[in-house]
Image (cartoon, helix red, strand yellow):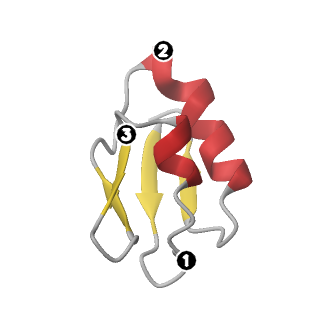
Amino acid sequence: MRVVVDLEKCCGAGQCVLLAPKVFDQRDDGIVILLDASPPKELHAAVREAATVCPGAAITLEEGQ
């Protein structure tokens, strides 16, 4: 899995950080910081959920990476 974030789409809701704090963080203004673009397999389910619930659709996943 490869994680890609679009900072222009991020609205700073922070759902990704709550669901996968080892993969996502937030700047002071709330915009996402990608900590791990290739997370380990045990985090994939949480990252998929984060991408699904992201209100700005800012998280894209490339499976099979």
Q: Residue 23 is drawn in which quadrant?
A: top left
- Identify which residue is drawn at 46% across, 46% down: 17
Provide the secondary structure element on which disc 1 rests: loop
Q: In this view, does 14 lie above or below 65?
A: below
- Which badge, 3 or 2, comes first in the chain's sequence? 3
Q: Distance between the residues labelled 1 and 3?
A: 17 Å
The amino acid type found where label 1 is placed reads Cys
Residue beneath disc 1: 11
Do residues under tags 1 and 2 come within 8 Å of each other at their CB atoms? no
Count of numbered labels shown in the rendering: 3
Q: Position of residue 26 (x, y in %)?
A: 34, 60
Q: In this view, does 5 lie above or below 24?
A: below
The amino acid type found where label 2 is placed reads Glu
Q: Name the residue nearer the viewer: 48 or 18.
A: 18
Side (left or right) of 43 relative to 29: right
- Identify which residue is drawn at 70% across, 67% down: 55
* Quadrant of image for the C terminus: top left
- Which badge, 1 or 3, comes first in the chain's sequence? 1
Q: How crowded is mark 3: few (under 14 residues within 10 Å), some or many (20 or more)?
A: many
Which circle, 1 or 3, is nearer the viewer?
1
- Identify which residue is drawn at 48% across, 14% down: 42
Q: Distance between the residues labelled 3 and 2?
A: 12 Å
Q: Where is residue 61 in the image (x, y as percent from the top left)?
A: 56, 49
Q: In this view, does 44 lie above or below 42?
A: below
Provide the secondary structure element on which disc 2 rests: helix
- Which badge, 1 or 2, comes first in the chain's sequence? 1
Which circle, 1 or 2, is nearer the viewer?
1
Residue beneath disc 2: 42
Residue beneath disc 3: 23
Provide the secondary structure element on which disc 3 rests: loop
- Identify which residue is drawn at 54% across, 27% down: 44
Q: Residues within 10 Å of mark 2 (few under 14, many from 20)?
A: few
